[in-house]
Each structure stands twice: as C-alpha cells, then as structure tokens.
Image (cartoon, rainbow, N blue to C red):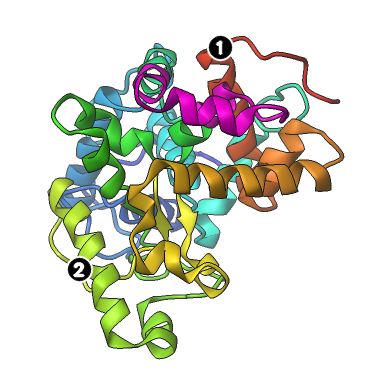
Amino acid sequence: MEYTRVLSYQFPLIRGEDVRAVQQALMALHIQPPCGSADGVFGFMTAATVKSFQAQYNSVGRSSGEVLDVDGKVGEATWAAVFNRAVAVNATAARIQSAAQSLAATGPVPGSSIKPAPCLTANQVRQVRDWMSGHFLADITAATKGSAVDADLVYAIACQESASVWLPWISTMTPDQVLAHCVFDASGDAPGSQREAFPANTAAFRGKYGDDLTQQLIAAANETRALRKLPAAQWVYKGYGIFQYDLQNIVDDPDFFKNRQWSDFRSCLDRLMRELNEKLTAAGGNLQDAIRRYNGAGPAAELYAANVIQMREWSGTAAAPLAA
C-alpha cells in the first residue's frame, strides 16, 4: 500500500483502506487519545490521535533532524513515521505490513534493500549508551568478550527494543526500576494486532498456564501501563526486559517469567547473547543477517536489522565492516 494522498479531517469525510491502515497503526502504537475503531473513516478522533502521534514523535524517537507538522493531517512525512514506527514495534496487521513494505522500497542500505528509519535520534542513542555503560559496562564487557557481538550492538538492540519508551524515565528512576518496568508488546490483544507465536493472546496463555500466573503477568503489564499513563487492561504482554525477551520462551525458560528475572540485567543480557550467538552461527558470521534472524523474517525483520545497524554506528564505530 503506497502513500497517495493527504488524509485529514474534512467534509465530506475521507474514507478508504489507507485511512484504515493508519488507524490500525495508531492503535498498535497505543497513541492516546485513541482513534477508536479502524473503520476507514478519517473523523475528528482520528485527527486528534494523529496530532498526538506527531507531537510525541517530535519529542521522543524521531529520525535525526526530522520534525513533523503537528496538524492532525497524514502527509507523506507523517505516513512514513507512523508505519515505520508501527513496524518497529512488530505490528503485524496486513495493511501495516503492506504500507511498510512500500516504504522499504525507497532506498537501500549496505547489505540490505531496506532504508533504515531508527526509532531514536543519534543523540538519544548515545544517551542510552552512556546510561547503560554507566551502570552495566562490566557485565556487557564480560558477556561480549570473544564474540562478534560488541557493546555497541548490545546498546543498539536495547534502543530498538525498548529505549524509546524508557529513555525519559532514566532521569527520575533507578536502573532497577527501569528494568522492572520493561514490559511491552501487547500484540495479539491490542486492537488491530495479531500474533502467530504462542501465546496468540491472553486467553491462549491462560488456557495453558492458569489464572495465577496470568494475573501476575497482567499485573506486571499494568504497572508499566500506569507509568505510560494508559488505563489498566486485562492483557498478558509478550515482551519482557530491556531486550524484550519474548513470552514464547516460557515453554523452555519458565523461571525467567515466573520469577520476574527481566528485572535483572545479567539475566536479560544472558538471553540476548545466547540468541545472538546462535543466529550468528546460523548466518555464517554475517552480522546484519544474524540481527535480521534474531527478529524474524520478511520486510519487518529487514527493517529491524537496518535500524539496529544504523544505531550501532551512532553508538560507536564498528570494529569491522559487515559481511556482504
């Protein structure tokens, strides 16, 4: 789905599948106030949600030097920002994927056909690097010793996975508090989202793991939702920790979730390094392909890898060129 026209609140009301796609992306991003249902009609509430997105994008997570007009209209720049951000949080609705794939065709980066659209600016990436190295450098140095995974890649994946949410918290919260509230990704339950991996949604998780653990994880999600000024929801979230260890891993690694090990940096880093090293082996040492494999397959995973590579470069000079 390509960008073809400016979407705005006007009479007669603009209708179409492009409007529906924008609404689904805004819902996947949990922008407040909510635009309501994805009905394909660009009404007053959709315009208000777009305006809120534009203001948020300008304050946190925009591409370097890029500022959106806060006017409630979806022009070409806002269209690109909405769908790049939706793909960055793994929104899987078909219309979102189609729009993002169209954006991905706008230009190449080395080793990929995807043009990066990082969720943080270069300065914000360096803020994340400085905060993480200030608190966890010894752990990161020990974990990456002898690996093709370097500290800058660790910082970049944290940037891609979660830092756009928690970066504003570091001035008022301790590192332990930040880590404890890294519970994100409502895919499968949030309107306009879907999920293929187990658990597809909260009902599927409850059916396998029962009410007690389900309610524990719902409570953890709601602690974070409160910080984000979102109302409580009866949803089990799917991403845990600063690197967003996926809930599907509960099958083989139950203690991480049952014992809230996402609050412990070493536990999170151990899972990240294990997965990245496995993907590096599968990718034959090609770092960018390993990052893509770490996220999955398809255009969204290629965009993920391109974003991580860009933020790794911003964090610090790469030790060696990427494999072709």
Give the quarter of the image for residue 148: top right
Taking depth in this image into account, of 121 and 264 the one nearest to the observer is 264
In the displayed structure, 213 sits above or below 217; it is below
Whether residue 307 is visible to the viewer of this picture, yes or no, is no
* Residue drawn where x is 56% and y is 70% of the image: 197
Q: Crowding at label 2, few (<14), some or many (≥20) Cα neighbours within 10 Å? A: some
Which residue is identified by label 2? 233
* Residue drawn where x is 29% and y is 69% of the image: 217
Q: Where does the image place residue 87, in percent across and percent down from the top left?
A: 50, 46
Taking depth in this image into account, of 54 and 265 the one nearest to the observer is 265
Taking depth in this image into account, of 64 and 256 the one nearest to the observer is 256
Tell me the magenta residue range: 129-155
Residue type at mark 2 is Ala
Q: How many marks?
A: 2
* Residue drawn where x is 21% and y is 42% of the image: 177
* Residue drawn where x is 48% and y is 75% of the image: 199
In the displayed structure, 319 sits above or below 206; it is above
Q: Where does the image place residue 98, in percent across and percent down from the top left?
A: 58, 51
Give the quarter of the image for residue 132: top left
Which residue is identified by label 1? 316
